[in-house]
Each structure stands twice: as structure tokens, then as C-alpha cells.
Image (cartoon, rainbow, N blue to C red):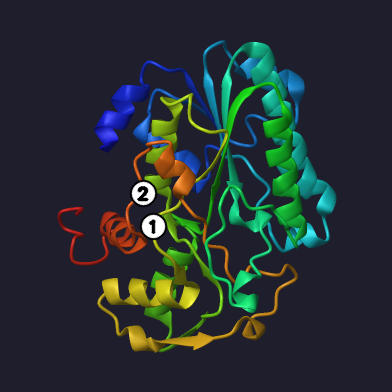
């Protein structure tokens, strides 16, 4: 569907967006301006009374609120589980009481991402058993389980590697580093599914109109890439020499939380639900950069 079609289709449905200041939340409000958006400061999803006061019968809550400090979570598990486990549980219970629906965003981090280490690079499907290896991943899995165990009419949508080419996301960071440095070292041994926030938001709004869809879904732009691949594509789109991006392995950037080596998500569930597939990641990236005023399509927004 086009942006205009999505906005028209969902105009009849009261929409509530939590985590409205995040990448996906902002795109949802852009595509569905009639939605009510709440930042984490405006609505604490861990507060049952506050959540209940924000709901109305027949509404659909799009939960983009989350604790996303992956590394900090390793030493602050209580905060991670409060935001990613307790919050969704409270939302689901409130939705069940109010007769509202819930669409909850989750992550590829619910999987260990170790398949590439064994030579198995089959994308993770909704039928695969989660096996998170980080506190962040375990907290997000706790949220999924709470939502799916509730009596609310709810969907959990896992996604990955979300960017908007605005702010401080990976794509924006690569654009900045291209201007500031002669060369940039980028990890080449982590592979995932780069996902444009605007494409994901459009998909979520289509899901709003499909209550019969499965309760657990994966939604990412099609294809797969390493961070190195993505960085080179950004440089190329910006008219810079992609050879200025140099591949390194994960060991070059030690972090408190282990990153998945291979966390590509299979979109079979999304396609079988007859939801519009998200386009190839390379095409989506060009659109994101054009919207940001970068690349050949910048003048027209193509």
C-alpha cells in the first residue's frame, strides 16, 4: 500500500502509539497523523493506572516503547526487564480489560545469532525456539511471552536493524563519518536484516487492519547484509568511494553485550498472512537517503 492508502485505511481505527519519539513511533505518527502518540515521559507503560486511562475500547495500541540500551542492560537488568518485560505485560493486561488490540514490537536479539558459527545460515523463523544470550534479548523475550500469554488480542512483530537515516542511527552515523574521516572500519562478521523505519511503520499500519493475522510475525526489509555491506552502500549512495569502508571482525569493537553473528529474520509468516512484503533493503536504503537529501533520488524523493 502507499503511504496515503495506509493513512486512509487506518483513519477509522483509534490508534495509540507508545514510544512515539523513537524511529518507528515517529514514522507511525507521520503516516497516521490522527494517532495519539505518547513518549516514555508522557506515558509510563509500566504504570497500570496511567495505561488504563490512555486506552479506549476498539483502539489499537502500537507499542514502540522499549529499553534499548543493549550494553547498559548487562549491568542494569532490572531496568531492562522493567521496560521490556513488565511494560508490555501491563499494556497487554490493560488492552484485554479495555477491549483494545495490541501490536508489540520485538527484536532479532531473542535469538542467539550463532547459526553462522555452525555453518547454518537459514534465517530465523517464527517457528524457531528463541535462545537469547544477552540481558536485552532475555528482557525482550519476556515481553513477548507476557503479551502472547495474555488474553489480549495481540500481535508480536519481531524486526531488526532499524534505521531512519535521521538522528544518530547507523546510517546517519556512516554519513557523518564519511564527511569526517578518510577511512572507516566497520564490522563485517555480523549479518542481519537492515530495515527502514518508514517501511516497517507502513507494514504495522497494514497489520492494524488485519486482526486475523498470526499472533507472532517477522517483518524486515527483504534480503540480508553485514554492517560492512550496509556502510558501503551508504557511502556509494552518497557519491563516496565505498572502498573507504574497511572490513573488520567483531573483536575489533569489544562490547559488554554479545552481538548476534547471524540474525536474519525469515519473513515467511508475514507473506503467508498476505501482508505486503517489505521491499529489498537496498531499495529501501536509497529511498531513506533520498528523503534525507542524499543520493541520486534526493531531488525528487524517489
Residue 233: quadrant of the picture: bottom left
- Which label sits on residue 222? 1
Quadrant where the C terminus sits is: bottom left
Say which label, 2 or 1, has the lower sequence index: 1
- Which label sits on residue 52? none
Where in the figure is residue 129, as x and y percent of width and height? 69, 52
Along the line of sight, the residue nearer the viewer: 291 or 189:
189
Above or below for 49 versus 139: above
Q: Is residue 28 visible?
A: yes
In the drawing, does residue 194 fall left or right of residue 187? left
Q: Residue at x 57, y 57 (%)?
A: 124
Along the line of sight, the residue nearer the viewer: 178 or 24:
24
Where in the figure is residue 237, as x and y percent of width and height? 28, 71
As measured in the structure, the alpha-carbon distance from the residue carrying label 2 to the one carrying label 1 is 6 Å
Farthest left residue? 300
Above or below for 69 versus 14: below
Where in the figure is residue 24, as x and y percent of width and height? 48, 44
Q: Residues within 10 Å of mark 1 (few under 14, many from 20)?
A: many
Q: Residue at x 66, y 84 (%)?
A: 251
Label 2–label 1 contact, CB within 8 A: yes
Residue 3: quadrant of the picture: top left
Q: Residues within 10 Å of mark 2 (few under 14, many from 20)?
A: many
Quadrant where the N terminus sits is: top left
Q: Is residue 238 visible?
A: no
Q: How many marks?
A: 2
Q: Residue at x 43, y 64 (%)?
A: 172
Residue 8: quadrant of the picture: top left
In the drawing, does residue 134 fall left or right of residue 191? right
Above or below for 277 versus 228: above
Q: Which residue lies under the disc numbered 2?
A: 278
In the drawing, does residue 284 fall left or right of residue 28? left
Is label 1 in a helix, a strand or a loop? loop
Amino acid at each position: 500500500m502507499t503511504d496515503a492508502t495506509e493513512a486512509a485505511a487506518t483513519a477509522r481505527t483509534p490508534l495509540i502509539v507508545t514510544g512515539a519519539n523513537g524511529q518507528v513511533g515517529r514514522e507511525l505518527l507521520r503516516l497516521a497523523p490522527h494517532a495519539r502518540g505518547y513518549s516514555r515521559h508522557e506515558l509510563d507503560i509500566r504504570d497500570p493506572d496511567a495505561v488504563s486511562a490512555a486506552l479506549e475500547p476498539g483502539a489499537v495500541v502500537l507499542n514502540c516503547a522499549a529499553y534499548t540500551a543493549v550494553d547498559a542492560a548487562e549491568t542494569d537488568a532490572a531496568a531492562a526487564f522493567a521496560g521490556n518485560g513488565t511494560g508490555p505485560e501491563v499494556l497487554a493486561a490493560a488492552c484485554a480489560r479495555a477491549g483494545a488490540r495490541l501490536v508489540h514490537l520485538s527484536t532479532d536479539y531473542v535469538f542467539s545469532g550463532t547459526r553462522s558459527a555452525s555453518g547454518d545460515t537459514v534465517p530465523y523463523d517464527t517457528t524457531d525456539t528463541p535462545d537469547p544470550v544477552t540481558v536485552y534479548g532475555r528482557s525482550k523475550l519476556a515481553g513477548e511471552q507476557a503479551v502472547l500469554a495474555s488474553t489480549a488480542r495481540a500481535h508480536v512483530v519481531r524486526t531488526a536493524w532499524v534505521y531512519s537515516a535521521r538522528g544518530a542511527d547507523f546510517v546517519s552515523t556512516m554519513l557523518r563519518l564519511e564527511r569526517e574521516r578518510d577511512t572507516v572500519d566497520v564490522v563485517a562478521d555480523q549479518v542481519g536484516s537492515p530495515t527502514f523505519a518508514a517501511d516497517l511503520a507502513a507494514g504495522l499500519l497494514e497489520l492494524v487492519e488485519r486482526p486475523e493475522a498470526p499472533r507472532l510475525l517477522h517483518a524486515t526489509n527483504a534480503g540480508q547484509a553485514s554492517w560492512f555491506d550496509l556502510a558501503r552502500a551508504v557511502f556509494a549512495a552518497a557519491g563516496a568511494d565505498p572502498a573507504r569502508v574497511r572490513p573488520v571482525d567483531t573483536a575489533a569493537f569489544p562490547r559488554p553485550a554479545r552481538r548476534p553473528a547471524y540474525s536474519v529474520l525469515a519473513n515467511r509468516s508475514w507473506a503467508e498472512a498476505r501482508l505486503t512484503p517489505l521491499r529489498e533493503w537496498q531499495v529501501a536504503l536509497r529511498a531513506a537517503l533520498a528523503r534525507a537529501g542524499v543520493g541520486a533520488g534526493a531531488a525528487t524523493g524517489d
